Amino acid sequence: MDCQELFAHLTDLLDGALSPQEEAMALEHLSSCPECDRVLRQTREVTRLVAEHGRSPLESSRRREILDRILRSIQ
Amino acid sequence: MATTGSERLAESERWLVELFEHHADAVFNVAYRVTWSAADAEDVLQESFVQAFLHRADLRDPARARPWVLSIAYRQALMCCRARRESPTDPSLLDPRPDRAGDPLDAVVNGERAGMVREAIGRLSEDLRAAVVLRDAEGLPLREVAEILGIGLSATKMRVARAREQLRAALGEVL
């Protein structure tokens, strides 16, 4: 696997969706390519940051009010 | 004993309340990330559950409720953005959008890591933003994200990959 192929498989690699054979080839490439290893680590950190900071909770008072509006509008 | 019309309505309302309790946060988050306006996201949230109620017969498999209601919300959010483009809203009514020239390092220095991540998400296009928020913030499987966005699995993977790559470029200095 070369850098371009690794890049194409990055999403599947992070999602654990590669076949065992593809994953082994990806890991082999990563062990010898610091640049791809850096990209992988940074992308993994991006997914973690989006998981941590990418949600905007709805305030509980607004939540109740909106549910009431929904229930009124379907009467 | 036959159920009356009012009993059927009460049962449907209970179903709707339960659907809302389980999925309102995810619907609001997706709506907010697409529209970038808390007020619009609340409107989308309300309309999505009204539409879900009106079309409840379309949900054949109750186990598929989450992607079903999120796909309604995604369509409603896109319609909201389209309507806004056709009759532009006063920009002051929208939540502050990230400044494309903003330096991510400044945000970190100021201890605003969360804000920096949200700003970077806000710089993505609507379709990339929805894909990465559904996958990484809501933690949904790619197949479910594809179902919600109404596109194929390969196109979904591409959107998630492009979104992550743009975020990596935007946040790169501090990753």
Image (cartoon, grey):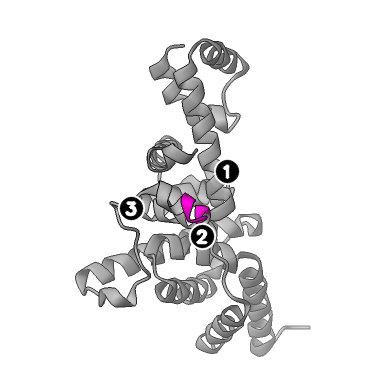
Q: Which residues are magenta?
A: B108-113
Q: Chain of mark 2?
A: B
Q: Are marks 1 and 3 in contact (CB under 8 Å)?
A: no
Q: Residue at x 60, y 29 (%)?
A: A16
Secondary structure beneath disc 1? Answer: helix
Cα distance between the residues tagged 1 and 3: 22 Å
Residue type of the residue flagged with mark 3: Gly
Q: How many neighbours does mark 3 have within 10 angstroms: few (below 14), some (14-19), or many (20 or more)?
A: few
**Taking B139 as reference, is B42 left or right?**
left
Disc 1 chain ID: A
Residue at 54 percent across and 42 percent down: it is A47
What amino acid is labelled 1 in the image? Answer: Arg
Up-down: is B173 above or below B71? above
The single residue placed furthest to the right in the displayed view is B1
Chain letter for the residue marked with disc 3 in the picture? B
Q: Position of residue B152 (x, y in %)?
A: 42, 40
Mark on residue B70?
2
* Secondary element at tag 2: helix
On whether disc 2 and disc 1 are found on a single subunit, the reply is no
Q: Given this view, does label 1 or label 3 mark the residue nearer the observer?
A: 3
Residue B17 at x, y percent in the picture: 65, 76
Please state which of the two labelled residues, at mark 2 or mark 1, is closer to the viewer.
Answer: 1
Looking at the rendered structure, the secondary structure element under dot 3 is loop
Query: Image height check: is A23 above or below B112?
Result: above
